[in-house]
Image (spheres, rainbow, N blue to C red):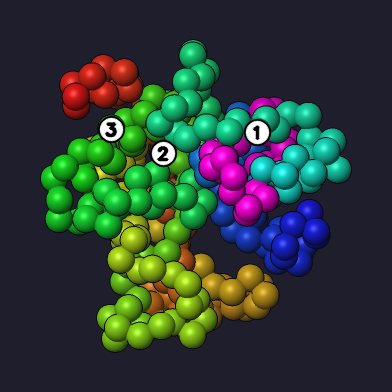
Amino acid sequence: MAEMGARPGNVRFHCEYLFDGIDLEDKTMLDVGAGDGRYSLYAGCVGARRVVSLEPESAGSRSGMQERFRWAASTLEARDVELVTQRLQDYEPRSEDFDVVLLHGSINHLDEQACIGLHRDPAAQHTYRVLFEKLAALSRPGGALIVSDCSRENLFARLGIKNPIARNIEWHKHQTPELWAGMLVGAGFASPRIRWASFNTFRSAGRLLLGNRAAAYCLTSTFCLTMERSAGRSVPEPTETLAAAQ
């Protein structure tokens, strides 16, 4: 995975952070917005039985995500990792559900326009409620949900200036982990755990010193939210929810 754009040691350290406390051995995983596939392929390499990777790179896109994904999967002979070129909204797995669902840097892209006003707009909240109920329907009771993104609360965003560390982040297109957790609880998930990331280059020492809310607020505001699919709670079928919304 060294050729996928990051130092392999940093990628491994970040993967171990993401999946902390989650057993992937002989499990199934859905990776929503898989990008170049590094997290899907990591799961496959450490024992996941099956990984479905949703990466809906648009036609004509020059990002090359799918091409890099296929190259890496071929190089690693990752036969249990399947690339599906669909959005979550369009994905219909029939009766399959998953032990682990991962959204790494993709939760705000499920519906970017709705995400912008999610903290104040009931229509936007309804849009995401439908999406989260579909995630719950795809998750096995007791299974894990992992959401990694950056929070809209950042020192530089508050000051109205570019963050020198992450100049391309559009803070208004993100939300706080607390908001995501609250909405996900309403969709059938429970037990939120919020952690704050630091620079992978600094490894464990960096995590100890900078892996907290105050440091994140002054850096990139990157968080990892882990939740559990509630056992015994019924979730509306996505088709029923979508029909009611029309």
The residue where tag 1 is placed is 83
Q: Earlier in the sequence, mark 2 or mark 3?
A: 3
Helix, strand or loop under label 3: helix
**On the image, which quarter does residue 191 sit in?**
top left
Q: Earlier in the sequence, mark 1 or mark 2?
A: 1
User: Is 50 inside the magenta-drawn segment?
Assistant: yes
Residue at label 3?
130
* Residue density around tag 2, few if under 14, some if 14–19, many if 20 or more, within 10 Å: many
**Against 98, is 41 above or below?**
below
- Frontmost residue, 135 versus 230: 135
Q: In the image, residue 28 lies at what x, y percent?
A: 61, 29
Residue at 52 percent across and 32 percent down: it is: 86
State left or right for residue 144 relative to residue 4: left
Q: Pointer 3: residues within 10 angstroms few (<14), some, or many (20+)?
A: many
Name the amino acid type tagged 3: Val
Counting the numbered discs, the total is 3
Q: Magenta stretch: give its range.
A: 39-65
The x, y position of residue 124, in whole percent, is 21, 45
Q: Is residue 88 above or below residue 174?
A: above
Instruction: Report whether residue 133 is seen.
Output: yes
In the image, taking residue 244 as reference, residue 15 lies left or right, namely right
**Which comes before the other along the chain, label 3 or label 1?**
1
